[in-house]
Amino acid sequence: MLKVSWRTTSDMSKPQFDKPQAANFTTVEASNGAKLEVWFDKLNIRPYANTLLIRVGRGFLRQGDTLTIRMGDRRQGSPGFRLQTNVEQHVELKTSVDAFATYEFCELPEQPAFDLVPGPAAGWKAIWPSLAVVGEPFRLAIVAEDMWGIRLPMPRPALKLIAIPDSSWPCRQRDDQQRRRPARV
């Protein structure tokens, strides 16, 4: 049996095995054609509880045989697999093997890992206070996000913003005596 586990605190999707055209469709194949049983459960030790389990149901694996795991297998129409929605270097998939069917798992000496990087910008967001006082500075943040909402690094050269006043803006100026002051915490 083989266990491939990832951190419980991740918002990575759960694999599914019976809807090839749906998101997160996952397949596992043995290079020698062995029949495999595959399922997902929370069976490992924290923080790596999310676990893909693979058991050889019929046949066996010999030295040199391989298992190919496709999380988000697109060959039958799945749109893919959603990984966690934050950037991280060296996302590790803890992989353990029970080679003798004794339910004593040993971690592989080298763990599969990858860097999670954002995709191309799919949209921009402006973040600013919901209430600002005319004539006083306020903080404005401009962020680019990929299709999953992962923030991208700011482009170089920096953005240039130009304000073009318009009478349709939903703001009005108040005189000094009626200005709202931000609450102090």
Image: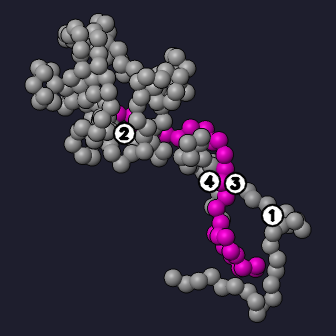
- In this view, the mark in front (3 or 2): 2
Mark seen at residue 159: 3
CA gap, disc 1 and disc 3:
13 Å
x 19%, y 26%: residue = 97
Q: Residues within 10 Å of mark 2 (few under 14, many from 20)?
A: some
The amino acid sitting under disc 4 is Val
CA gap, disc 3 and disc 2:
31 Å
Instruction: Determine the image quadrant of residue 171.
Output: bottom right
Q: Outermost residue toward the right?
A: 167
Q: Indicate the position of residue 52 as horizontal and vertical percent values.
A: 31, 30
In the displayed structure, would residue 168 be above or below residue 8? Answer: below
Q: Identify which residue, 77 or 83, lies in the foreground.
A: 77
Q: Outermost residue toward the front?
A: 18
CA gap, disc 1 and disc 2:
41 Å
Q: Which residue is mark 4?
A: 143
In the displayed structure, would residue 127 be above or below residue 84? Answer: below
Query: Exactly how many numbered labels are in the figure?
Result: 4
The amino acid sitting under disc 3 is Leu
x 24%, y 14%: residue = 57
Say what secondary structure mark 1 lies in: loop
Say what secondary structure mark 2 lies in: strand
In the displayed structure, would residue 153 be above or below residue 167? Answer: above
| Residue 135 among those drawn in magenta | yes
Q: Is residue 158 visible?
A: no
Task: Tell me which label, 1 or 4, sits earlier in the chain.
Answer: 4
CA gap, disc 1 and disc 4:
18 Å
* Quarter of the image that includes the N terminus: top left
x 56%, y 46%: residue = 149
